[in-house]
Image (tube, grey):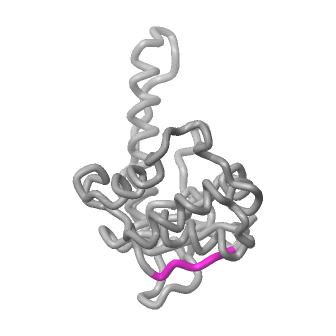
Amino acid sequence: MKALVYTRHADKGVSVCYPMADLFAYMTRGGGYWNDRPRGFLDELVRRKTCPVLQKGNPITQEAAVKFVHAMQFGGLTTAEAWDVFRLHDCERYGFNVDMIDTGELPDRWFRDAWSRSANGGPVSVDMGKARVIQWERIADAVSRENKRRELDLFGPAPIRLRKTTYQTAIKHARDEEELRRIWVPSLPQL
């Protein structure tokens, strides 16, 4: 499956855009998405898409709005042209270095908030510094939730005592994201 990947302006993190198949169908076939709307609706839609107030500070360019609205209403685009419309409309207002990728190239979603790319784009990788923090937070959160559950069980098991230094050392020395993900409290179910 194909998708668009880009680096966000806000935090330099990575986002993935999966355009809906229905929208591709309107763009590459006969269009007609807004056939039931009154005269002037398309012009108003373009105006709204380019308005900073209505778009909460993330308006799109006039060119991107017109291309998207015309593609949805009139269709007739090639697949490559439709991808370009999605790139302009859905990605470039939020980020830069937009590339089309095969989704099989993406890292495991477990560390989704630690995904990064080089300054020039390229493949998505996992920032191990961010991933270590994410793994520790997941472990601590899972232990907290499990201990709350155990508190309510009068005859159940005792609360889990988390050996913080043991887990922090293991997390610190993990060589890659697979090894990092395997660090987990044995008495907890794997998420």
Q: Is residue 146 above or below residue 141?
A: above
Q: Main secondary structure of the magenta part?
A: strand
- From the viewer's perspective, tell me whether residue 25 is left or right of residue 82: right
* Residue 164 position in % (x across, y down): 36, 52
Q: Nearer the viewer, residue 5 or 151?
A: 5
Q: Which residue does the image show at 57% across and 69% down from the upper left?
A: 85
Q: Which residue does the image show at 22% across and 53% down from the upper left?
A: 53
Which residue range is magenta in the image? 97-101
- From the viewer's perspective, tell me whether residue 34 is left or right of residue 117: right
Q: Which residue does the image show at 57% across and 59% down from the upper left?
A: 181
Magenta highlight on residue 83: no
Q: Quadrant of residue 188?
A: top right
Q: Is residue 177 above or below residue 190?
A: below
Q: Which residue does the image show at 42% across and 65% down from the upper left?
A: 132
State the quadrant of the N terminus. Answer: bottom right
* Residue 154 position in % (x across, y down): 45, 9
* Residue 31 position in % (x across, y down): 69, 54
